[in-house]
Image: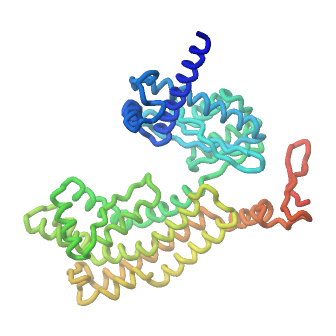
Amino acid sequence: MKSHCEKATESSKKKLSSQLKIVFHMATHVIPSNQFVAQTELLRALEAPDFVTTDGIYHHSDCVDDMEKALEDVVMNQKQEKIKRSDFVGLIIDETVNITVNKKLIVYLKLEMEGKVETCFLGNYDVDCGTARCIYDRLVAVLREIDVELSRFIGLGSDGASVMMGRHGGVGALLKQVNPFSIQVHCVAHRAALAALDAEKSVDNITSYKNTISSVYSFYKHSATRTNRLRQLTAELHDEDMVSLKQPCAVRWLSLHRAVKAMKHNWPAVVMELTEEALRGNAKAQGLLGQIQSYSFIAMTHALSDLLPVMTKLNLVFQKDDVNLSSIRPVVQASVAAFTQFRDAPGPEEETFLAGYEDGKYMDIKVTNASDRSIQAFRKVRERFVQHLIDALQDRFPEDCLDLLHCFDTLLNPRRYPPTQNGKKELFFVPLIEDKGLLCPIIL
């Protein structure tokens, strides 16, 4: 009897383990829990060893919740072990909302594991309101739940909002009262995106341009018939598929670049389709046609096609999982240099437009509002916008801060250390001010 029971227990454990692996796979690939039964039936159809019979196989999707909870406990225990081994802890937080518009606080931890930095997701927690005190109290409660002393906290990374980085009442300032040596870091990718947004807000013409693109996007989004006609016209003109129109979105970094790229590609087809709609008496099509046929709109589309890739490249560099300090200074300076060049002379895309614009037409389509005065006005707008981009970048990335980053790279980048006798590069930390706990890195 004992041997039979042990065999049955081992068999059930193996089946349960396989089902837990299915649930883990579903969770990591964002597969709904109600698909659990379908997954097990697929494995049974494939004659997987643990699913040949239905004995010991759960058939109700509710059991997935219990298995997810069990997996969560294991994952959290593993994370807590890592957190205990890390002498210092950094926080990365941001406010968000769920589908029911309840305010949430997403929290990541940065840990030091054997000389390497590791980022781990901690959780998405409910908060009553978005005040600094409320967020701080929730953070303290979360850290206490995982036995993290605030004295181990050394840094806060955020989107730079005043509620996070306010000097007197922000979350960082409240945390600094507990640990005076903690620092606050404004997300560098978010900072670059805000530089582009600052420049856009400084020039009304850019706002009007974005509104026009959004209106064109909405005009076709809500009509399958118009979209199909636009797709057919694009195929006839370019012998290729239409690039779907995009909407500039304030909450998505540099979405304007994708919207401009799509508009530039589809512009002839959009003009032709809107002309057909206007001849049928569609008042909205008539209004949109007047806007996108103007010289300023077409020229701005090509000018932004030169400018926005520079900001996109800058932002993508900063969005890398592992940003090298040495890359920040040169990439910012290269971006400023590129913008300076575009301010003083048209870029390649704008040159293409100027070369193709002849006798009041571009790509055999009549261009409206193309008087000398309008052309001069566009040039002034472009120069002003580019200058605002340069100013915003220099304001968000001051030269003294870039110099400081370069110094940190020189001091802390292991690739710059001379090799020791055994060929390895080693860094040791020695007390700089022992009673304050400050350390100074030196090469030995």
Q: Is residue 137 visible?
A: no
Q: Quadrant of the C terminus?
A: bottom right
Viewer-nearest residue: 105 or 228 = 228
Relative to residue 164, is residue 401 depicted above or below? below
For the point 91% across and 42% down, the residue is 435
Relative to residue 327, is residue 360 depicted above or below? below
Relative to residue 265, is residue 162 depicted above or below? above
Quarter of the image holding residue 269? Answer: bottom left
Q: Quadrant of the N terminus?
A: top right
Residue 234 in the image, given as x and y percentages of width and height: 23, 71
For the point 88% across and 60% down, the residue is 443
Residue 311 in the image, given as x and y percentages of width and height: 50, 67
Quarter of the image holding residue 141? Answer: top right
For the point 74% across and 34% down, the residue is 84
Residue 95 in the image, given as x and y percentages of width and height: 52, 41
Quarter of the image holding residue 238? Answer: bottom left
Viewer-nearest residue: 211 or 262 = 262
| Residue farthest to the top, as pictured | 1
Q: Is residue 17 visible?
A: yes
For the point 74% across and 32% down, the residue is 149
Q: In this rendering, would 389 be left or right of 288?
A: right
